[in-house]
Image (cartoon, rainbow, N blue to C red):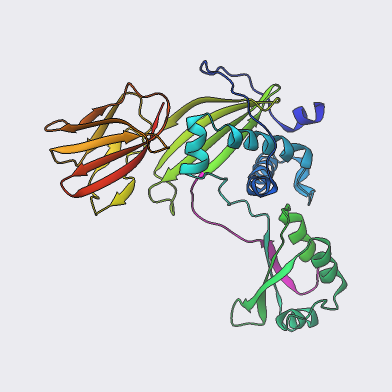
Amino acid sequence: MKKIFLFYFVLVTQVANAQFVPSSCTAPDSILIKYKGDADRMVLGKIYRNHLSYMDSIKIPAEFSSIVLKALIAVFNAKTLAARDTVTNIFNIHTFPDIVMNDLYVVADSNLNWMQQLKLRIIPTGNLIIDNLMADYGLKLRSFYPTSSDNFKTVTFKSDSNYNLQPIANLFKLVTGVRYADPDGFCCDGNNIIDSVYNDHVELIYSYGWGDCMAGCINRRYWKFKVDFKCSVEFVTSYGSPLFFTGIIENNLTTVSVGPNPVQGTIFLDGITVPYSYSISNMLGEVLMRGKHLSVNSINAEALYAGIYLLSIQIENKSLTFKILKE
């Protein structure tokens, strides 16, 4: 545990009163694989942001990523929390892949024998360093293509395992004739998860971004969870941009939007024409509320318990369905 404290910066914070719900940190391999990349990426990002000595390690420290992975799995398994359904099912939030752990590119003189062998997809290439790097880290040849009009060409590799790729790239740079070697790049912005590890729990903040994310998302909504080391989960709060956008489009009724989402009391409808009918159902399809409004563009949802619901709007022969979260 002492080693963990050396790795993470421990803070003391106050959070809103809420209750932990029992969960589990175990899951089938299909779910573990789904979130292992997130855990490894969060740890690797923290290593580089804080310039830790692990920057020189090719393997991502399992003792740290396992802590984060267990917390992610605990949130995934906390199915009684409505916010869990929002981040795992509705938006399917994962870490933004700007930290690349599987793809590597090398630019080298194409006249070299090992480059000629790679061009012909002949492996091993005969170059001991290249062949050992490919074998040791499971690097599979993806592509071989021109970089410019000169003799230097680009080779891309992919590994099925997650690695800190920069030290591997640095080993490629030691080979005569290699001009560049780096992890493959990734642009833009999108959904993300960030973590903070404390002495008694892990905090996870999921975020959903939208609006010109090619240049950096204009809008972003956040959901904060706490996971203790017994795998119990607490949804703390949500904040950020309100989710004003349309839901499941049916029959081209596309001008209507609802908000705020998540909703606490009143649902407001923007772009609605009256009269209209509405119904609110749970995820089992059971209708809990229904009504018809002749002149009001809002629906009182205070009677609903916290959870995920389907709001259906009908105007004449057109309809539109929204997934809404009641907090």
- Residue 11: image location, x then y, percent: 64, 22
Instruction: Tell me which corner region of the image, top left, top right, bottom left or bottom right, holds residue 100.
Output: bottom right
- Residue 298: image location, x then y, percent: 22, 30
Above or below residue 111? Residue 165 is above
Q: Residue at x 78, y 81 (%)?
A: 122
Q: Farthest front residue? A: 286
Q: Residue at x 71, y 31 (%)?
A: 8
- Residue 272: image location, x then y, percent: 18, 40
Q: Is residue 143 left or right of residue 235?
A: right
**Is residue 180 magenta-colored?**
yes
Instruction: Tell me which corner region of the image, top left, top right, bottom left or bottom right, holds residue 169.
Output: bottom right
Specify the quadrant that holds the N terminus. top right
Q: Is residue 292 left or right of residue 148?
A: left
**Is residue 314 magenta-colored?**
no
Magenta span dominant secondary structure:
loop
Q: Residue at x 42, y 37 (%)?
A: 283
Q: Which stretch appears magenta?
A: 173-191
- Residue 154: image location, x then y, percent: 65, 74
Q: Is residue 201 left or right of residue 260?
A: right
Q: Residue at x 80, y 83 (%)?
A: 113
Q: Nearer the viewer, residue 209 or 276?
A: 276
Specify the quadrant that holds the C terminus. top left
Above or below residue 294? Residue 253 is below
Instruction: Tell me which corner region of the image, top left, top right, bottom left or bottom right, holds residue 183.
Output: bottom right
Q: Nearer the viewer, residue 94 or 102?
A: 94
Q: Is residue 84 visible?
A: yes
Above or below residue 69? Residue 251 is below
